[in-house]
Image (cartoon, grey):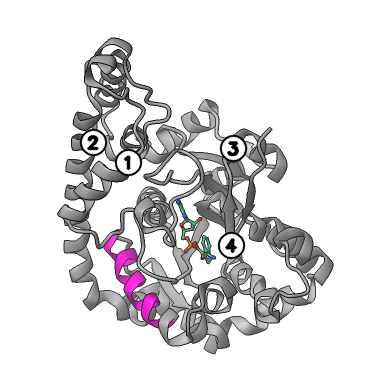
Amino acid sequence: MEEFKITPWEVEGKVDYKNLIEKFGLKEIDDKLLERLKKITKDLHVLIRRKYFFAHRDLEIVLDEYEKKKGFFLYTGRGPSGPMHIGHLIPFLFTKWLQEKFKVNVYIELTDDEKFLEPKRNLTLEETKKWSYENILDIIAVGFDPERTFIFQDTEYIKNMYPLALKIAKKINFSTAKAVFGFTNETNIGLIFFPSLEIAPTFFEEKICLIPAAVDQDPFWRLQRDVAEKLGKRKSAQIHSKFLPPLTGIEGKMSASKPETAIYLSDNEKTVREKIYKHAFSGGQPTVELHRKLGGNPEIDVSFQWLKILFEEDDKKIKKIEEDYRSGKLLTGELKDMLIEKIVKFLEKHNEKRREARDLVNVFKYEGQLAKEMWKRIHQ
Ligand code: TYM
C-alpha cells in the first residue's frame, strides 16, 4: 500500500479513505444511517447523499439525543491563513444545511493564533487577523442563522476560553501530543498548547457536540474524546468529509499554497475558465478520435469528480454525464464547460452574499442571540 500522511498541518500522498476508517477508528456512513437521517431531514444534501461525508463517530448518538429532545450543537472552524478556496467552504455548506434541518446552535472558531504559530506559514498576527475578517465574510455568505450562530476569533475570545483551555491542557501530556500530532523537540511551545483551544469549544454546551470537518482535523477529536472522559465531560461526535481533490489530479487535497490546484472564492470568471482549461486533470483520451472510440475515465477526471461531489446536484443528470463520458459521447472540453458554468454561477451568488455580509459581522460576533448568550454565560 502507498504511504500517506495526515495531520491537521500536513496532508501528503494518495489518501486511502478505507484505510483511514480503520486507522482512526471511524465508522463508515452507510445506507442504513443515511435512511435514518433522511427520516428526520426529509431530503439529503448532495454532500452526504453521495457519501462525500464518508465517516463519523457517534452520529447515531447525536440522532438519538435529537429524537429524545435533548438536542445537540454544531461546531466547526477555519484557520485564517489566506483567501478561502472551494474546499474550505465545503464543511460550512454542510454545517449550514444541518443547522437548517435541526435548528441547532453553531459555533465557528477562527484560529488566527494557530496560523500565526504554524512555522511554515510565516504570517504575522496582523495578517492572520486581517484574514480572519476576510474569511468571516465568506463564512457568513454561506447563510447561517444569525440568531443561532456564534463566530469567534481566538486572539479576541481567548479570555473567555482560557480557563477551559487550561483544564484541557492539564490533562494532555507531551508524549500523547507528540504521538497524535507528530510534534518534535523543534516544535514551538505555542503550537503544543494550541490543541486545547481547538478542543475547548466542544464543551461550550452541556449537550453533545457534532463537528463537521474534513478528516484532517481528526487528531484533535481523538484527543478531545480522551480528555472529555478525564474531565467528566461529553465526548464529541464527528462527521468527516474527504478532501476536495486538487484541480491537478485526484490525489491529495486542494491546497492554498499551490494556487494552480485551487479555485478561490474570489476568482473571477476568466480565472476560473483559464484554471480549469489549463489545469483540470482529464480522464479523457489524447485525441477526439480515440476518445470517441475508447471513452473517458470519470474516476480520475477532476471536472467530473467536482460535478459529482458538489456542483451537479441532479442525480439523473450526473448519471447521464457519467455514462456519456465513459462511452466517449461527451468530450473533456464539454465536461469542463459544464463545470465552469456551474462554478461561475456558484461564485457569483456567493460573492453577492459576501458583499452583504459586511453588515452582519458584528451580529455574528457580538449582537446575535447566541453571541449574547455566550457573553452572559461567562459574565454572570
Ligand atoms: P482549515 O482552515 O485548514 O480548513 C477549514 C475547513 O476546511 C476543511 N478542508 C477541506 N475540506 C475539503 N477539501 C479540502 N481540500 C479541504 N481543506 C481543508 C478542513 O477540514 C476544515 O474543516 N484548525 C482548523 C480550524 C478549526 C476547525 C475547528 C476546523 C478550528 N476549530 C473545528 C473544523 C472544526 C483549520 O486550520 O482549518
For residue 280, the mark is: 1
Disc with the residue nearer the chain's start (1 vs 2): 1
Label 3 residue near ligand 1, CB within 8 Å? no
Q: Does the magenta stretch include residue 154?
A: no
Distance, label 1 to label 2, CA atoms, is 8 Å
For residue 336, the mark is: 2
The segment highlighted magenta reads: 129-142
Dot 3 falls on a residue whose secondary structure is helix
Dot 4 falls on a residue whose secondary structure is loop
x%, y% of residue 306?
A: 34, 39
Q: Are marks 3 and 1 in contact (CB under 8 Å)?
A: no
Residue occupied by mark 4: 9
Q: Residue at coordinates 66% horizontally, 36% vertically from top-left? A: 2
Q: In this view, does 216 lie above or below 281?
A: below
Distance, label 4 to label 1, CA atoms, is 25 Å
Q: Quick one: label 1, few (<14), some, or many (20+) residues within 10 Å?
A: many
Residue type, label 3 = Tyr
Q: Is residue 140 magenta?
A: yes
Q: Nearer the viewer, mark 4 or mark 1?
A: 1
Q: Do the residues labelled 4 and 3 touch (CB within 8 Å)?
A: no
x%, y% of residue 56?
A: 59, 43
Quadrant in which residue 257 is drawn? bottom left
Q: Which of marks 3 and 2 is in front?
A: 2
Disc with the residue nearer the chain's start (4 vs 3): 4
Q: Quick one: label 2, few (<14), some, or many (20+) residues within 10 Å?
A: many
Q: Do the residues labelled 4 and 2 touch (CB within 8 Å)?
A: no
Disc with the residue nearer the chain's start (3 vs 1): 3
Label 2 residue near ligand 1, CB within 8 Å? no
